[in-house]
Amino acid sequence: MAQGYFKDDMEIVGQVYFDNLAMRSFFQHLKNDCFDETRLICKMHDIVQDFAQFLTKNECLIIETNDIEVPKIKSVHERTRHLMIFGEKNSPFPVSVYKLKKLRSLLLRFPSHEFESGELLLDLFGQLTCLRSLDLSRPIFGVSSIHRLPNEVGQLIHLRLLDLSWNTELTKLPESLCHLYNLQTLNIRWCLDLKELPHGMGKLINLRHFDNLGTASLTFMPKCLGRLTSLRTFERLVVGGISNDGEAMTLGDLRQLNNLRGTLYIRGLGSVKDVQEATNAQLLNKKHLLKLMLRFDGQITDTDRIDDLLLEALQPPLDLEILYIDEYMVLAIWPSWLIQLTRLRELRLESFKNIEQLPPLGILPALQVLYIKNMPKVNKVGLEFLGIGTPPFSSSSPAFPQLQVLRFDDMANWEEWDYEITTGTVHHSTSNTNTSTFMVMPLLKSLRFFACHKLKDQEKIRQDLVKASTTSLLMDLLSATVTTIDSQSI
C-alpha cells in the first residue's frame, strides 16, 4: 500500500495477494497477534528471503553497523530504494545513508542517544524527503524509545506509512505531522506515555489505518478524527474525558466512520451522560467490525449511571465475532440485541458489580469461548443460564451447542450451580404440562474455576464432567493466581 502498488480497494486486493502467498508457503509461523486476535503475525521463509535478497540486491539493502563498511553502501546508493539499518548501542551512524535521495522505505533500529533525542531523525527528515514508508517502531527488547519526534517530520510529504509503535517514552506528536496529507497508516500502538495527539489530525484526509491500541495515557481523542471517513482501523476511543478546549471526540463522532473494521475498543462509557450520543454512534452500520470492547469506567456515581441505556443503544453489527463488556455498574443488563449475535464466537463479561443473574447465553449458536469474572452479587447459576424460556430456545437443540471453553473467575459469593447442567448431559425439564429433554454443552473441552471459593459440590461437578461421553473435558480448579493482561493498559 505504501509503495502505491494497489489503487482501489487496497485492503481487499492486498488480502487476496497475502492469502495466495501464504497458500504457496511464502510465509512461515503464521499466528494470531497476542494483543489482537483479529491480526496475523508471520515472517518470510528463510529460503524465500535469501532468494528475494539475491534478486533485489541492488534495490534492497540491510546495514548492520557493526560489520558492514561504508564503501559498500556508497557503491549501491543510486539504486537503493528500501533500507533497513540495525545498530548496536552507541555505534556510529552510517552518514552515507543521507545520499540515498530516492529511498522509498526505511526501517531503523538504532539505539543511540542521537536517535532517542531526535537529533538523528532531524537530519534524516531533511535529507530523505522521498520516503513513503518509515518504520521507527521499537519492538526489540532493550532498544530505547524515541523521546521526541522532530517537527521536521512534516517535510516527508510523500509518506504513506509511519510506524511509531512501542516507543514507550514518546509523550507528544508534533502538529507538523498533520502536513502529511498522503499518510495512509499511522501506528502508535503501545506508546504508553503518549498524552496528546495533534489537534489538526482532521487534515489527514487519506488516513485509512490509525493503530492506537495500548495508548493508555491518552485521555481523549481530537474531535476532528470523526471527519476521516476513509478510516478502516481506529482501535481505541476514549469518551467522557476532559479536554481543555472542548474538542474531545464523543460517541456521536463515530457516526460517519462506517468503514471501520477489525477491533474497536471504547472506554470511558461510565462518564457518558447522554444516551443520544450512543445512538448517534450507529455501531450497527459498521458492518466490518469483528471485535468490540466496551468499558464502562468513569466518574459518574452509581445512582446516576445510565449504563443499561448506553449498552442498548450501542448495538453492534450482527456479524460481530468477539464482544467484551467491562465495569458495567447498573442492575439491568441484558440488551435486546445480545441474542441476535448469531456469529459471536467469544464473549467476556467482567466486573458487573450489581447484577444477580447471568444472561441466557445458552441460546447463542456460535459461542465457543465464554469468560465470566467478578460478579459479586451472583449467588446461584441455574436454568436461566441455558436460555430456557428465552426465544429462540428449542428443546430440540443443545444449549451452548458450540461452547468449548468456559471460565469463571473471582465469583466471590457464588454458592450454587445446578451441576446437572454439564457437558454432554441430557437434561430433563419437567413442568405441569410437558417434559422435554435436551443436551447441554456437548463440545465443552475446558472448564476452569478461579477464586470461586464458596461454590458447593465442586468435586461432584468434577466427577460428572469426567463421566461425560460426548467429548474429552479438561477441568482446572485453580487455587493460584492466573496471569492476565490488565485491561487498564489498553
Image (cartoon, helix red, strand yellow):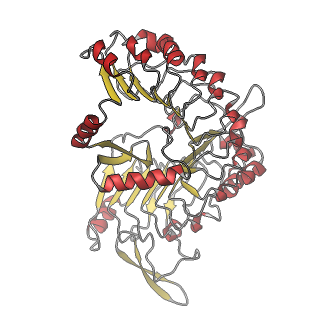
Specify whether 234 is left or right of 167.
right
Residue extending farthest to the bottom is 433
Specify whether 66 is left or right of 267.
left
Tell me where residue 477 appears, x and y as whole percent.
32, 52
Write the residue at 69% across / 44% down.
302
Tell me where residue 299 appears, x and y as whole percent.
69, 36
- Location of residue 150 (image quadrant): top right
Say if 180 sits above or below 415 in the image: above
Write the residue at 39% across / 51% down.
18
Q: Nearer the viewer, residue 86 or 236?
A: 86
Specify whether 412 is left or right of 94.
right
Residue extending farthest to the left is 47
Q: Nearer the viewer, residue 83 or 484?
A: 83
Say if 232 sits above or below 357 in the image: above
The answer to whether one can see residue 332 in this image is no
Tell me where residue 195 appears, x and y as whole percent.
60, 24
Tell me where residue 183 appears, x and y as whole percent.
58, 35
Q: Nearer the viewer, residue 72 or 431?
A: 72
